[in-house]
Amino acid sequence: MNATGTTLVIGATGTTGGRVVARLVAGGHRVRAASRRAAPVPGADPVRFDWYDAATHDAAVTGTDRVYLVPPVGDPDPAAVMLPFLERARAAGVCRAVLLSSSAVEAGGPAVGEVHRALPGLIEQWAVLRPSWFMQNFTGDHAHAASIRADGTILTATGSGRVGFVDADDIAAVAVHALTDERVPGSDLVLTGPRALSHDEVAAVLTEVTGRPVTHRRLTYEEQRERLAPLTTPEFAALLAGMDRAIAEGAEDRVTDTVRRVTGRAPRDLRTVVERELALAAG
């Protein structure tokens, strides 16, 4: 891979995209930071990009040779906009793509799984990142963080199922390696933290770190689906509630060595991340 190339980072102001931009810039790489408002990002060239406005796509990929792909949020069929974009990107000279997917979605599965399945046939050099649930869901703008701040509760339909929650910084570190290393993975990479935790255990860690009581309120699949429906589409609410149900059945009770293998260091644990995020938020 040409180390002097330019990387387009889609979702450049988001949870992983912002971290990917910062790491690329710190490493001396040229970056185009794509967002709907072309928000200024230190060290990067801002560019307006909207998945649902094809007029923004050609300008975004022109002059780039690799791209970090964050799917449109809440879209149950992202392939409808992502696959035509990838065809445009290939025609414009993009030869490497790193797709952000989910540990819960296999190639050919729902939502971004269709993009995962098609990617190797569209872009010569590729990788798919399949992180577990983000640790930042409990500290940022996610619904979990909002309910924790509002009344000290985490609401899920996961029961006692465990998840290998992962730090968004660790996801970004792996993404930058996949974008810039001489050899591209050419595979999907399941990313987790060092331990699989239930939401009861997460609540206990948050209680200890914040000094405020946090509890996990267990919902049924139907209760979670109905709770999420006003926040998104009915189809996506059902998908999210179904992911909770899969966690309850043990689908995410695993840890991998991917972060250590790719970056050379261990993934960060939940306590460390929560302490860091809260300190950053406090200024």
Image (spheres, rainbow, N blue to C red):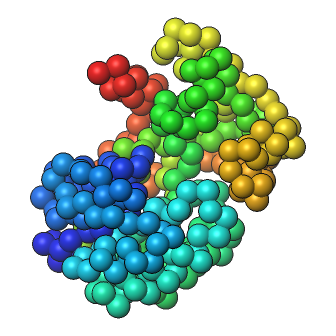
Which residue is drawn at the image coordinates 51% and 36% (left, top)? 141
Which residue is drawn at the image coordinates 57% and 14% (left, top)? 207
Please say whether residue 189 is visible from this viewpoint. no
Q: Nearer the viewer, residue 173 or 75?
A: 75
Taking the image as shown, residue 82 lies to the left or right of residue 222, namely left
Q: Nearer the viewer, residue 107 or 242?
A: 242
**Picture coordinates of residue 43, whole percent (x, y):** 15, 53
**Picture coordinates of residue 70, whole percent (x, y):** 46, 62
Corner quadrant of residue 89: bottom left
Corner quadrant of residue 183: bottom left
Please tell me whether residue 243 is drawn above or below residue 72 in the rendered image. above
Please say whether residue 58 is visible from this viewpoint. yes
Which residue is drawn at the image coordinates 16% and 62% (left, top)? 29
**Picture coordinates of residue 119, whole percent (x, y):** 49, 80
Please tell me whether residue 133 is drawn above or below residue 99 in the rendered image. above
Taking the image as shown, residue 158 lies to the left or right of residue 112, namely right
The residue at the far top in this view is 211
The residue at the far bottom in this view is 91
Q: Nearer the viewer, residue 36 or 128?
A: 36
Taking the image as shown, residue 198 lies to the left or right of residue 271, namely right
Which image quarter is the N terminus in?
A: bottom left
Please tell me whether residue 258 is drawn above or below residue 223 in the rendered image. below
- Marks counted in the figure total 0
Which residue is drawn at the image coordinates 28% and 64% (left, top)? 47
**Picture coordinates of residue 283, whole percent (x, y):** 29, 21
